[in-house]
Image (cartoon, rainbow, N blue to C red):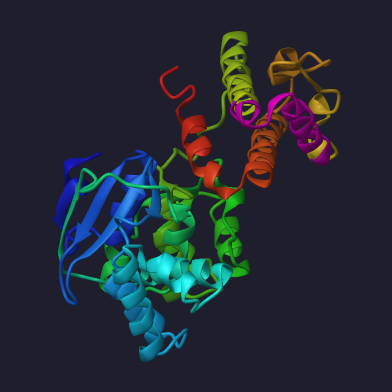
Amino acid sequence: MDEALRRGNLSETPFATVLAGIWREELTGTLRVDGVGGPKSFAFENGQLLIDRASLAEKDFLKYLLTSGATDLISLAQSEEFAERNGVSIIRALLEVPLVEPGRLWALLEGFVKEEAYALFDREEGEFEFGPLRTPRGPALISLFVPSLILEGARRMTNDSVIARLLPPEGETIQGLEPYFLDLLDLLPHEKYVLGLLESPGTLSDLYESSDLGKRESRRTLSVFLCLGLAGTKPPRPKTGKLPAEMSLADMDKVFGIFNAKCSYIFKYISKEIGPVALSVIGNSLEDVRSRLDPAFQGLELKADGRIELKSLLKTSMNLIGDENRRGLLRSMDEILVAEVLAVKRTLGSGHESALVRSLERIGETS
């Protein structure tokens, strides 16, 4: 992780940027942020934000229960007394008294940690430091997908100066990107609209002018897209620039080889958890999208190791067809990978998706 993201001040590095760096690099440790309202600490494991016994700020959580109307002062006192008398955690005490049922308590825990984080997105001051876990952690009570947390936190931002620090100069050219976790985010309709505008690269000022969302809301949406990697800056291309007329067989071997390496990795990942039925799960995910794929992929076959085999001569096709069809083939590869990741999410739960996605992004990056 960049040293500027390990320690610094929110006046220079916005909280959203710090979170994105921790997630991208799959870091394990504790993030401490000082400032108004006292220090706040967040525990991470492999880039995922989690709460366990050691990381839970019990007094703050009890205050949250009280202010949210989930309980009253007398009931909280009874729970604290029970925890102290029996030497158990406050979470167990709240359930043993009983004060709240498990499903409701876990929802309150998730709401608490999210609100603690959301309060920092607009913060302009405060030292932060990321370091090792301060105490050995136990089983996670809550594990959060950080990109979704960043997305919601940015939606709540009102501080224009912080938003501005997340954006490049208005003359910079930006374009939409398609990371593998894109379909794992619940984008709102207006966010999908802005993402659609980014399909054609242009400067920030051009986008503000063309966006019916208006400059203020477009800036907010773009700031989180850039932070998450849903959009990125791009140097201006000459007006006469075009895609290469052909891709060499070596280039195509590399593209398809990386694609298949990712397919194989997904299959191995889910196989470790559910065994032989994994082939059926992956196969069903492919059938769900087959009709939307490029004709070259219509006859695909799923091999026993999770790789994709095509009946058509894909490599030859890539050298003979035009730019748009070539892009269609690449989009089909992306759609297959997203479908398989979503199959893992549905089968194993959301706790597995972020680790899988980050591992996929590393495959082929040094090729």
In depth, the one of 115 and 153 nearer the eye is: 115
Magenta residues (range): 269-288
Would you say 116 lies left or right of 2 here? right
Would you say 362 lies left or right of 90 here? right
In depth, the one of 151 and 105 nearer the eye is: 105
Residue 154 in sight: no
Q: Residue at x 63, y 42 (%)?
A: 348
Point out residue 84 in the picture as x, y percentages from the top left corner.
29, 70
Query: Please, is residue 90 above or below residue 312 in the view?
Result: below
What's the magenta bit mostly, secondary-structure-wise? helix
Task: Assess whether residue 273 is covered by the magenta stretch.
Answer: yes
Q: Residue at x 59, y 51 (%)?
A: 184
Quarter of the figure with residue 126:
bottom left
Would you say 14 lies left or right of 262 here? left
Point out residue 163 in the picture as x, y percentages from the top left corner.
32, 67
Task: Assess whether residue 102 is covered by the magenta stretch.
Answer: no
Residue 285 in sight: yes
Query: Please, is residue 127 above or below residue 260 in the view?
Result: below
Would you say 237 lies left or right of 265 here? left
Locate the N terminus and report the quarter of the image it occupies: top left
